Amino acid sequence: MKKNMGSADRVIRVLIAVIVGYLYFTNVIPGIIGIVLLALAIIFVLTSLVSFCPIYAIFGMRTCPKD
């Protein structure tokens, strides 16, 4: 797995995940939609940690500088 995510992309994903987590645990976004968004937030954090996004790989996208 080659890295295909830049640092700005990773920071934005983590910030979105933190916001969604906060909104879910304060019951601003309850129910099924909250669970779906929380799962998406977890995926955002995991992809940020490994600097690889499978969807970017499928479409041949990169947000990190070339090696």
Image (spheres, grey):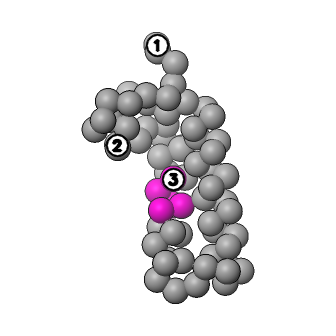
Is 35 positioned to the left or the right of 17 in the image?
left
Is 15 positioned to the left or the right of 42 in the image?
right
Residue drawn 52% across the image and 86% down it:
31
N-term mark: 1 or 3: 3
Is 48 positioned to the left or the right of 16 in the image?
left
Give the labeled residue for mark 1.
67
Residue 43 shown in magenta: yes
What secondary structure is found at the residue carrying circle 2? helix
Q: Amino acid at mark 2?
A: Pro
Q: Quadrant of the N terminus?
A: top left
Residue 28 shown in magenta: no
Q: Where residue 49 appears, x then y in whole percent?
A: 54, 44
Give the labeled residue for mark 3.
44
Give the labeled residue for mark 2.
54
Q: Amino acid at mark 3?
A: Phe
Residue drawn 63% across the image and 34% down it:
8
Q: Amino acid at mark 1?
A: Asp
Q: Where residue 57 appears, x then y in whole percent?
A: 32, 35
Q: Residue 50: which disc?
A: none
Give the Cα distance between marks 1 and 3.
23 Å
Is residue 41 at least partly visible in the picture?
yes
Residue drawn 46% across the image and 83% down it:
32
Which span of residues is magenta-colored? 40-44
N-term mark: 3 or 2: 3
Is residue 1 at least partly visible in the picture?
no
